[in-house]
Amino acid sequence: MAEGERQTPSDSSEDAPPTTQNFIIPKKEIHTVPDMGKWKRSQAYADYIGFILTLNEGVKGKKLSFEYKVSEAIEKLVALLNTLDRWIDETPPVDQPSRFGNKAYRTWYAKLDQEAENLVATVVPTHLAAAVPEVAVYLKESVGNSTRIDYGTGHEAAFAAFLCCLCKIGVLRVDDQIAIVFQVFNRYLEVMRKLQKTYRMEPAGSQGVWGLDDFQFLPFIWGSSQLIDHPYLEPRHFVDEKAVNENHKDYMFLECILFITEMKTGPFAEHSNQLWNISAVPSWSKVNQGLIRMYKAECLEKFPVIQHFKFGSLLPIHPVTSSC
């Protein structure tokens, strides 16, 4: 589906000033556990968590079928993700003795590594072309690790950082908020699930039954926000197979639950203990607040996750400045 590719990127320089920013290739800055303080004080951390919370507010109480504006930039991002999906079809798994970590993933990843800047250039208007190499790094970081053939919440965070960067350069705007989650991030999730299934990817840094999920975290946050003040669906319903089957197409949270039940066998309370505990929380707003706290503690404040995060001019390591 290349509908988003039918035009060359429009040069909308009349409503966006020519860029004077010096873009740089993002690099790792968190090398030791004591460096984590630098991360928590950084402009990058403030902007990243601010972006997550803004989107959390934007989708509150809204179904996936809710009518919202779809801009040209959103269409182009979906087309980019459709391309990644098509490349999976063109790169079937290879026969190998090991059940997990199919080596065909490396072939698929090599194509993305080679084409990432070209893909990002289809989304970014020409007057912002200088930003493409910086932004493309986050796209490459968002699909898993080609050495270990694994995927986890750090890769998911890189995709959110990719979207955050596109907001910071003005490609995505305030009125794209709902579409960022419902169209772009939701399509990203579909492609990641297909990658995980096709190439039997390992969970990166999985905490087993004590983690929320082997692969994702953000759709649980935004998905629980969608369900706040729902007239009849309560947290206890997401462990009810009938409720999930009837409502998963409208709510990201339930779509995540459906994927878990497809991928895992045995009692839900055993393979997904944290989620089972969450189903006892009385309201979706409490679930949402709890998940945000858990995301900060279990992902954003964990050295094994953040050591891989890359910092550039758009998500800088320098401490928060009051002028920003």
Image (spheres, rainbow, N blue to C red):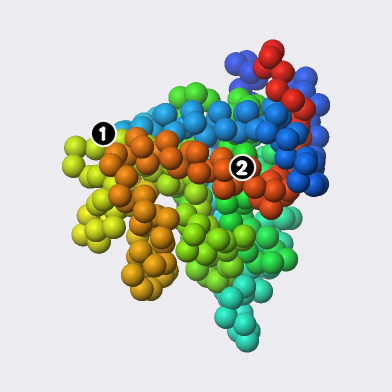
In this picture, residue 197 sits left or right of residue 239: right
Query: Where in the figure is residue 211, as x and y percent of width and height?
Result: 50, 57
Q: Residue at x 60, y 33 (%)?
A: 48
Task: Please give the name of the residue rendered at 77% of the width and 23% of the height, measured from the top-left corner.
Answer: 21
Sequence-wise first label, 2 or 1: 1
Residue 300, label in figure: 2
Looking at the rendered structure, the kind of residue marked 2 is Leu
Q: Residue furthest top?
A: 323
Q: Is residue 87 visible?
A: no
Give the crowd class for mark 2: few <14, some 14-19, many >=20 residues within 10 Å.
many
The residue under label 1 is 229
Q: Nearer the viewer, residue 68 or 299?
A: 299
| Number of marks present in the image shown | 2
Q: Amino acid at mark 1?
A: Asp
Q: Quadrant of the C terminus?
A: top right
Q: Residue at x 70, y 29 (%)?
A: 41
Farthest bottom residue in view: 97
Q: Residues within 10 Å of mark 1 (few under 14, many from 20)?
A: some
Image location (x, y in percent) of residue 251: 33, 46
- Left or right, 287 with reference to 194: left
Task: Name the residue nearer the viewer: 149 or 70.
Answer: 149
On residue 200, the disc is none
